[in-house]
Every structure is written in structure tokens, then in C-alpha cells.
Amino acid sequence: MSRIEKNYLAAKEEYAALGVDTDAALRRLAAEPVSIHAWQGDDVKGFEAVEHDLTGGCQVTGNYPGAARNAGELRQDLDKAMSLLAGTLRVNLQAHEVDKMFPGQDRDALTIDNYADWLAWAQERKIGLDLAPAYYSHEKLDHGLSLSHPDLAIRKFWIDHGKACRRIGAQFGKVLGTPCLCNVWVPDGFKDIPADRLILRQRPLESLDATFEENFPETELLDAVESKLFGIGAESFTVGSHDFYLSYAAKNHKLICLDSGHFHPTESIGDKISAICCQQGKILLHVSRGVRWDSDHVILLNDELLSIARETIRGAGKNQVYIALDYFDASINRVGAWVIGTRNMQKALLVALLEPFAKICEAEYSFDFTSRMAQMEAAKALPWGAVWNYFCETNNIPPDWEFMENIRTYENQVLSRR
Ligand code: RNT
Ligand code: ZN
């Protein structure tokens, strides 16, 4: 018996005494989908024929060598990352991460043919694909506006882009047998205080309605809209604020996407999950880590992540919480960034799955808040690490202390030669 297995059996016994079934937790963890964001691998650059500067208020800092220069390299890097990860993984694309563009083609005319290799790749690996239209890094994001631009031709270009992405997403969903989450986030906003806020919110409403005109079965496509508080260069006003999109999602039966970097630092995303799910039944999360601002740092196993995972497992009840990651760090090895962040997400989910929830609730339901506090604190010292190591071992992936060696070899053999 390996040391890891021995430790697992001891942990299993300790958990069983608290009414927690570790085997069931491991099964549930393996089945919980996590959508990995492809854009960590190419610094949100995409692979269009023309190179665009990153705009829209997102920033990628750092110049660590080895960023993917085309979709083939991005897939190769994702394959490496996924070889060091277990569980049910999906891959989330930004629309400009195409295999290729055809001569004269722009984003308003994208079709499944621009993603044929992505689709074949996902099919071979039996994973789902998600897709996000890209309303930034393009000259048609004019004066910081896309779907809310006063010029109808500009709005139409972006509406057509959104429509194209939804059609492509539905095809991903149909072929892969799992619905594609298509998430609309637009950077529209102003550096300084707007005069006419109302018109700036009415226009995108119409644009969104036009984007969502075509109907697709929910087995193929799920639409989401992502809100934001502010961006760099759009500090004073964001068209798609939380209030704007929460109402839009509720009224139009879309998922609201909450990005953990898009709120005031003292706001808790964990708390929002049950508040939204008890009314809307489903929610999309962009799990990120802001450091002082929406900086999209690699997610760490910190209190915020634990609270998000806990609410995903508990607070949502029978509702559907879709987990997608959204961070990008170009100052460290990008494969490492994927592996560290995804493992952290899964570890947080495991901690939540192993929590003696029924026992703690018993204290709460009988208004014994002292016991509730004592038990919540005691749960922090439970041996979940032994269960995690066992998850890695039984899924034939290296434990946390060992995967960097593997990534270093890949860096030397592949990444550093780019
Ligand atoms: C931007 C949003 C959005 C992006 C991606 C790259 O603040 O979070 O989800 O991160 O489109
Ligand atoms: Zn996001």
C-alpha cells in the first residue's frame, strides 16, 4: 500500500466519524466540470491574420517566454496542462483564438470553419468547448464603445459577431454533446463621467436583443452576460454594470456571469451565488483573483476561492453553477499558471465537498451559533490534503509537489524554443 493510500484510509476514517463519505466526495469532484480559459496561453492575443493590441481595459503584464503563437501551439500547451490535471475539464475560447482567418474575413463573418481544428481536437479528447465573442482588441471598438456605439454600422458589426459566435457555439454543443456556454462581455465604458447614461444603456439593450434573436436548444447553447464594475480606461462608467446585466439576465432568461475580479474588493461573490440561484436556477462564474483591482491574477487557494467553492457545492442546492476560470499572467510559465489555478479550483471544491455540512447545519438550525462557529473552525484542520493526494494518485497525475518538474521539462524542450 502506498503512503498516499495509507494516509487516505486514515483520513477516510476521520471523515466518516463526522458523517462525511470521502469516496462520494471524490466521485463528485471528478464529475464537476471546470472550464479552462484558453487565453492564459496566448496572453489574450488571439490568432487573427492581423495582430491587434489588447484593448478593452484588460491588461496582461509580463514577458515570460513561450506564449502560444498560433492555435496549434495553444492546443499543444493545453494538452500539456491537461495531462497534469484530472476531473471533468472543458476548454473556453475567446472568439479571436481561431485556427485561421480566411482572406478578407472579419469577426462579423466567423463560422465553424474558423474553428474546425479546435472542434476535432475537443472531439478526440471528449471535452466540451465554450466560447466568448471578443468585442475588444479591434478598431471597431471605437471610443471605447461596441454594442452601445451611436453608429448603427458599428453596432451591427458587433451584433453580427455575437450572432456568429452563438451559431458556432451551438455547433460545438451539438457535435460535442454538451452545451457550449457563450458568454457576452463588452468593454463599453468611459474614462470620465458620462452626461447621458440612459442612451448608453438603451442602445446595448437593443443590440443584445438582436444578438440573441436566433433560438438554439439549451442542450447546445447556453447564453450568459458578464457584468463589470470598471476597467482601465473606463474607470468612471461601465455600460454593462452588475445592475444592468442582472436585470437583463433575469428578464431574458440568460445566465448572469459573475467575474470575481469585477466587484468591489469587500463584496463576496460567494454570497451572491445563492442570492441569484434561488431565483434564476443557474449562474456562470468567471473565477479570477483581483489584486487591488481587476488584475486577473492566478487564483490561489484563499478564503474567497473557498467561499465560492463552498457556495457552489452547498448554497446552490439543486441549481446549476457553471465554473469557468478567467485569469492571465504573462510573468510566469503559462502552463504552470493553468495547472496551479485549476488545481486550486478543484482543491477548493474538494474542501467544500468534505465539509461536515449536515453537522454544522444542525447547530445552525437549533440557533447554537457557538457550536456552528466551533465546527466551522474545526473543519479547517480536517485532513483534506490526504484526500487530494489520493485523487491525484488514483487519476495518475503527479501530486502538487511534483508537477513543476514536468512543466520545467516542457519549458526546456518546447516553450523556450519558440
Ligand atoms: C474582462 C472579462 C472577460 C475577459 C475575457 C478575456 O474583464 O473578465 O471575461 O477576461 O474576455
Ligand atoms: Zn471574466
Image: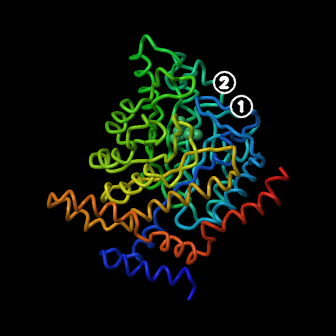
Please indicate whether residue 366 sits to the left or right of residue 3 in the image: left
Residue 53 image-quadrant placement: top right
N-terminal of the pair, mark 1 or mark 2, is 1
Residues 217 and 197: in front is: 197
Q: Residue at x 27, y 58 (%)?
A: 373
Question: In the orientation shown, which residue stands out farthest toward the left?
Answer: 366
Q: Amino acid at mark 1?
A: His
Tell me the residue at 52%/64% (across/down).
88
Alpha carbon of mark 1 to alpha carbon of mark 2: how far?
8 Å
Q: Which residue is farthest right?
A: 417
User: Which circle marks residue 139 in the picture?
Assistant: 2
Q: Is residue 163 visible?
A: no
Q: Do the residues under discs 1 and 2 have CB atoms within 8 angstroms?
A: yes
Pick the front one: 58 or 168? 58
- Which numbered disc covers residue 211? none
Where disc 2 sits, the SS reads loop
Q: Residues within 10 Å of mark 2 (few under 14, many from 20)?
A: few
Q: Which mark is residue 52?
A: 1
